Image: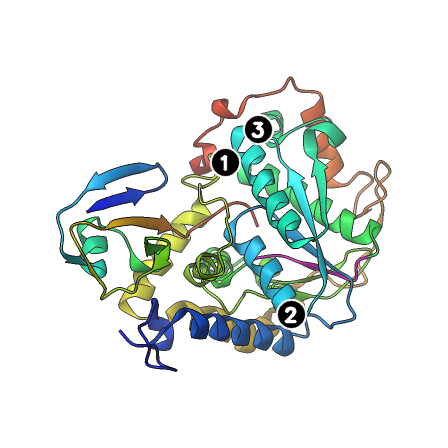
Amino acid sequence: MKVLLRNPRRELDIPGPRRVHALLADLELNRESHLVIRNGTLVPSDELLADADTVEIRPVISGGAL
Amino acid sequence: MKCRVCREPAVIDVPRHNANFCGQHFLDMCRRQVMKAIDDFDMLSKDDKILIAVSGGKDSLAVWDMLGDLGYQADGLYIGLGIGEYSDVSGEYAQRFADERGLTLITVSLREEYGYDVPTATVATRRVPCSACGMSKRHLFDKAAIDGGYSVLVTGHNLDDEAAVLYGNTLRWELEYLARQLPTLPARNGFPKKVKPLVRLSERETAAWCVIRGIDYLVEECPIAAGNRHLGFKDALNTIETASPGTKTAFYLNFVEKVAPLFAAYALPDDVELRPCTECGSPTTGQVCAFCNLATKARAHEPVPVELITGRGARRR
């Protein structure tokens, strides 16, 4: 599957099928800090991602001055 | 995974509630959390004239969207901070959101109206970038709220923001800061009432609100905030949260309920003598307020390109 990552923006090819939580773990990304979006739709952590999917892993943490 | 409410396929799991939700019922959960924050902390009434601090990021656009969804009328205020292309793009997101919904967005440009920008202020004052930025924003938000006759200033601070600040203040036992780290700060001494309706929603949840609602926001992080201490606190808390869901919620909300009252005596007293800043008229304890001191130094410095300070968020003072 094609996986779009941000900050910095980059794209990876990762073999599927694979569950969302496993994908995040493989990439050493915390589930609390990221959303996974497939075709514009959020997917939960047990969703099975297919080899043909294109997914975005979107970081949700922002941190400037308060 | 099935939605806890309707048993339809879930789009998001929310471990801190031990629940999964479809899109519609996730939005309902967010609305309930925001309404509870507004009610519990006496934040807003439908008669309030509301100003929202808008950055173009997920939290400020989510809170603007949610308040409108809940029947509150609010204007937005965007401050152009002069952080290179990042500021240009963030302003476009904020303006597009307002235009598409027929909302009023007030825009202030630090460079055009005050003669400096955040990169220049950072170098001129030898501050951490987020410090120069935060001081500028707080002053201009307060000023715009007071000058515009708004009864309350809304910010998009979420549960993660508040838990991270609390974590930092606790590690250093910053008693005065702990005493005033509340979801609602009443108006006083020439400062507007300030409220944080998103304190019961995590950062992941505000982002999910935006995705489900189709809100286009700036995902990229501020280039000069990267590596700052605040982000490190969030990472630490999220590591704990993953192992023990609900910890951030308990840490912050139990602080507000049970601990903050114990620190009230350390807050700056309401009757502290303030006088108008001799330059801008804003309330201050000295002759010239901290913002005008910063602005004066920054204006005297030649403009600094953002590339020169990228990554300085991690710098220690």
Inter-mark Cα distance, 1 to 3: 16 Å
The residue positioned 27% from the left and 52% from the top of the image is A29
Residue at screen point 59% across, 75% down: B35
The residues bearing labels 3 and 2 have C-alpha atoms spaced at a distance of 36 Å
The chain to which mark 1 is attached is: B
Q: What range of the chain is rendered magenta? A: B150-156
Secondary structure under tag 1 reads loop
- Of marks 2 and 1, which one's residue comes earlier in the chain? 2
Amino acid residing under circle 2:
Ala
Task: Decide which of B56, B174 is in the foreground and name it.
Answer: B56
- Per the image, label 2 sits on a secondary structure element best described as helix
Observer-nearest of B36 and B228: B36
The mark nearer the N terminus, 1 or 3, is: 3
- Disc 3: which residue: B119
Relative to B265, say whether B158 is above or below.
above
- Which residue is labeled 1 in the image? B317
Please state which amino acid type lies under the numbered disc 1: Arg
